[in-house]
Amino acid sequence: MAFPSDITLPNDARYYSFIETKRKYNSNYDIVWSFQYKLPTQTVQYGLSNIEEPSNYQLGFSTFLTTLSSPISALPGQYLGDSDPAWILSGGKLLTEDSQSLLTEGGEYIEVGSRELSGTLLKIAFDTTGYYAVCGRDSRPGVDIFDRKRESVILRDFDHNVVYNEHLSSISTSFSALSTDTFRTLRFRYVNLGQKLFIDYHDSDTTTYTTLTAIDLGFRLENYSNLDNIYCGFSFTTPVSTTADDLSAKEFYLRNFHVEGYEGYSVLTETVTSAEIPTLSSRVYSTVSNITARDV
């Protein structure tokens, strides 16, 4: 497979992406999904030889909500499985009479405006390198490469804007690194009409969730259609880029991918009424004074 010039991975790189298409959800309602993962600390490799330097491995995994029923043109490496921007922009390609895509002088697709959401709604990434937050091809917004944050959680919205980018260590003392020798559960709650996202977790020795972070997304896609066809997916890549120390995580385990939400096309509304609020009486009363009482 030929990658764009800004994606450089060694021959033994591993990457995959999947979308759970058995059920589709309506994003006007809460969507909650979770999975368990394990990344043992002594699981890095360089080529085919094992070494014990877990701090140098490169790995990124992400989970996302999308209207795509399959990961079209998924890009590995620092994009952690993102679809090619030419596919996910809101709109349709302008074609010639023989169905050829029209391009600008700069080689970009000419698209016709549309209110159809045609790609990722949001994507949450856990990245040991921080490269997922870096700006990239086709004017992809992001931070400078020297400002990236290692061992971080990153969120991009439907326009690929970086909505959240923080070190794990700055938001949690017990979940400060991705490596874990036992299964850790991550839960994501897309709530309040898509305006807020909660990320919770718990380790294997407890069933009580702890909130890792709560993110105000700052938008609601009420002007877009196709919001009742939302799927949930997952992507993984190791290493994230080719460097002088391009280490791959040897073992990564994923299990119990589970999604809950409302499956339906209609948006149900209900008018809630309360008891009538009493008003103050306008009747005028006279004050009587100099009245005494006596025993009879």
Image (tube, helix red, strand yellow):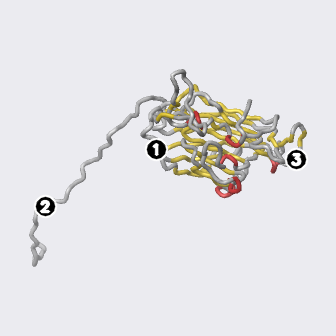
State the image coordinates of residue 43 (x, y, percent, origin top left): 83, 42
Which of marks 3 and 1 precedes in the sequence?
3
Q: Which amino acid lies under the numbered mark 3 shown in the image of this protein? A: Glu
Q: Which amino acid lies under the numbered mark 1 shown in the image of this protein? A: Arg
In-front residue for pair 287/57: 57
Regarding mark 2 in the picture, which secondary structure is present there? loop
Q: Nearer the viewer, mark 1 or mark 3?
A: 1
What residue is pinned by disc 1? 220
Relative to residue 118, is residue 49 drawn left or right? right
Q: Dot 1, crowdedness within 10 Å: few (<14), some or many (≥20)?
A: some
> Where is the N terminus found, in terms of image quarters?
top right
Relative to residue 18, is residue 120 drawn left or right? left
Which of marks 2 and 1 precedes in the sequence?
1
Q: Is residue 41 visible?
A: yes
Residue drawn at x 64%, y 43% as measured from the top left? 137
What residue is pinned by disc 3? 52
What residue is pinned by disc 2? 282
Q: Say if mark 1 contacts mark 2, CB within 8 Å.
A: no
> Where is the C terminus found, in terms of image quarters?
bottom left
Q: Nearer the viewer, mark 1 or mark 2?
A: 1
State the image coordinates of residue 240 (x, y, percent, origin top left): 74, 43
State the image coordinates of residue 51 (x, y, percent, origin top left): 89, 44
State the image coordinates of residue 15 (x, y, percent, origin top left): 73, 35
In-front residue for pair 201/39: 39
Which of marks 3 and 2 precedes in the sequence?
3
Q: Judge whether 212 appears above or below 3 on screen.
A: below
